[in-house]
Image (cartoon, coloured by chain):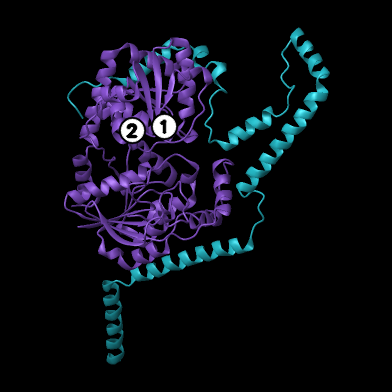
Amino acid sequence: MNIAFVAPFYGNRAAGGAESECRNTAIHLAATGINVEILTTCALDLQHDWNVNYYKQGESSENGLVIRRFRTEPVDLTPFAQLNQRMLTGGQRLSLDEEKQFIAMHINSFGLYRYLAEHHARYDWICFIPYLFGTTYYGSMLCGDRSVLIPCLHDEAYARMGLFREMFSRVGKVVFHAGSEQRLAQDLYGDLNGRGILLGEGIDTEFESDGGRFRSKYGIEGRFILYAGRKHETKNVHTLVRHFSAYRKERGDDVRLVLMGPGSLSIPEDMEAGIVDLGYVPDQDKKDAYSAASVFCQPSLNESFSIVVMESWTCRTPCLVHGDCAVTREHVVESGGGLYFTSYGEFRGCLDYLLANGDAAGRMGEAGRRYVLSNYSWDVITRRYREMVFGD
Amino acid sequence: MNEQKKPDVEAIVEEIRKSVSDAEASIPVDFREGVRAENDLHENLAAANRACAAGQKVPAGALGLLTKLVYRLIRPLTGEINEFHAGVVRVLNKLVRILEGGDAPESSELLEKTQRRISMLAQLSERLGEYDDMNIEERLRRIEEKLDQAGESEDK
């Protein structure tokens, strides 16, 4: 069986949930004996200039996968930024012509499209990830029924673009990470007529983690709440910092908040002892931190899966998520692996409960781990891909 | 999914909600404005616009009257400061608009380039549509049709 994954960015340095999912899924599927190729651009990632072809064009191989890279089309960011701004901050719907301009000015590669047009029949299935890129929109248009869309869909302004309604209607299959993501797609784009598959996302469950190693390396003692991810408004981390500042002021000094990940955030001056920002840390340190934390908090309102929640559960640490994020809330309720909040009062009540009831928190951590192992370990996910998507 | 009983999250959250009165549910005022992501340009700019003029915060009651009096006495000084702040904020507002393309003239060359890009992609997708249509079964069907037509004309 020959499978291709089409992604706007690919490589060790491509940060982001979808990029990471593409890479890991491709590697694990290849390990089951499927021939897997990656079709991608030469651009580095979303954060870097898309006009810079960071990687060399052509074919290479890595981790048992063939990688074909194609140059990106030059993008003028000024008109793109205008349309983007109107959608995101102006809350405006774009006209169909403007939507076409938006996607034509997004990440595109004519070289990739020519390759797909000429060679798509070589592949049994061609998986496109995530939904919001020219490579997915135009690429899936070129591959028709052979295309499998892995949208990583969020409830956001982009998702309401008419072009994507059309894209969802014409792809062969759509893979969802969570039931709430699938329901969102049905609300936005209508019935998928049996083409939608609730599959989940693979998680590495075999890793080792040591809380004591984290504490001694970073000099952190006592109980702490952990956040791992980008420190950006879109991740709602400012709400966590605000709630935690109020909580620590009310409840005392014996609990801290540890933040890790890229980005910057202003921390109240009187909270410098209570909130520790470690910035970027190596992956092993992050895994050690899960084991050391009393609670892992994911305050984001827009998640299509949340790998960090799954990793935290793999380390038996209970999670506190925002109740307005349908996906993470569903994970928590389904698994029994934590609690959710929608206001400061609930945040305080949930933290009080988790910190004061060690046994109950431990049971939640165990329930979360069982949930991950039975639903999202790689052997489960690759079997589902082979049986439910590729019809093996 | 598993044999062990999992915690009833909804029941626990419901209990927590009952224990939180409406008045307690909201965050203390002190913390509402205190934390802001540094990379949120627009929020910081809006804050700068709100705070650029000194002498706007006047408490209620007798203290307010006293504050107003003090502000009036130092107005020559605050006036100059406010003028400077307002100038800086206007420049920042303008810069942000330019950076985001709001004040940039719409270049016909750019629009043409975009239109060209769209039409190329449309042509590409149409070509592929034709390519898809021309599969072997379709070709065979067309040949059979032509053979039938030829046979019919010979019969006549």
Q: Is residue A71 or residue B22 the one in the foreground?
A: A71
Query: Where is mark 2, residue-wise?
Result: A308
Query: Where is mark 1, residue-wise?
Result: A279
- Calculate the distance from the C-alpha at mark 2 to the C-alpha at mark 1: 16 Å
In what element is the residue under mark 1?
A: loop
Earlier residue among tags 2 and 1: 1
Chain B rendered in what hue? Answer: cyan
Q: Are the numbered discs 2 and 1 placed on the same chain, yes or no? A: yes
Q: Is residue A198 or residue A375 the one in the foreground?
A: A375
Q: Is residue A46 left or right of residue A36?
A: right
Would you place residue A12 above or below residue A112 in this image?
above
Chain hosting mark 1: A
The reply to whether residue B22 is visible in this rendering is yes
Q: Which three-letter amino acid code belongs to the residue tagged 1?
A: Gly
Residue A7 image offset from top left, x and y in percent:
36, 52
Q: Which three-letter amino acid code belongs to the residue tagged 2?
A: Val
Chain hosting mark 2: A
